[in-house]
Amino acid sequence: MHSFLNNVTDRFDVGTALLFILLPIFFLIVDGRRYKVKGDIKEYNIIKAFSYFYMSIGIIFLMFLWVS
């Protein structure tokens, strides 16, 4: 586990983790709203799933960075 934390902290920093959190929020707000207004529910659900996935990865990276 310690080597995994070292690999994460060597490759990522807080800025990267924040990008993994903030960009999906932006895409969800901008693109998600466009797809929802156009009635493309399938595409909206895909954007929503990817956004939540990337936000959760960003939060996990941020927790790893705070722990180490």
Image: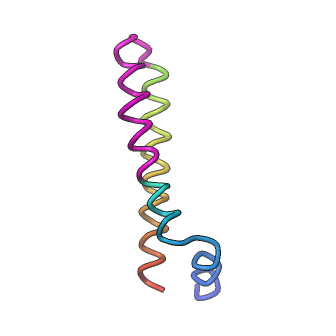
Establish if 18 lies above or below 38.
Answer: below
Q: Quadrant of residue 6?
A: bottom right
Which residue: 45% across, 44% down? 24
User: Residue 41: x percent and y percent?
Assistant: 41, 18
Q: Is residue 37 left or right of residue 42?
A: left
The x, y position of residue 7, in whole percent, is 65, 79
Residue 43 appears left or right of 11: left
Which residue is depicted at the point 38% across and 43% down? 25
Residue 30 is inside the magenta segment: yes
- Residue 53 in the figure: left or right of residue 9: left
Image coordinates of residue 61 in percent, x first then y, are: 49, 68
Number of numbered callouts drawn = 0
As rendered, which of 52 and 65 lies closer to the eye?
Answer: 65
Which span of residues is magenta-colored?
22-41
Note whether 50 is above or below 45 in the view shown.
below
Task: State how the image is colored.
Answer: rainbow
Q: Residue at x 48, y 86 (%)?
A: 68
Q: Residue furthest top?
A: 38
Q: In the figure, 24 relative to 17: above or below?
A: above
Q: Quadrant of the N terminus?
A: bottom right
- Magenta: main secondary structure equals helix
Residue 66, image quadrant: bottom left
Q: Residue furthest front?
A: 15
Nearer to us in this view, 54 or 18: 18
Residue 10 percent across, percent down from the top left:
63, 79
Determine the residue positioned at 44% across, 69% down. Answer: 62
Q: Is residue 11 left or right of 49 when viewed as pictured?
A: right
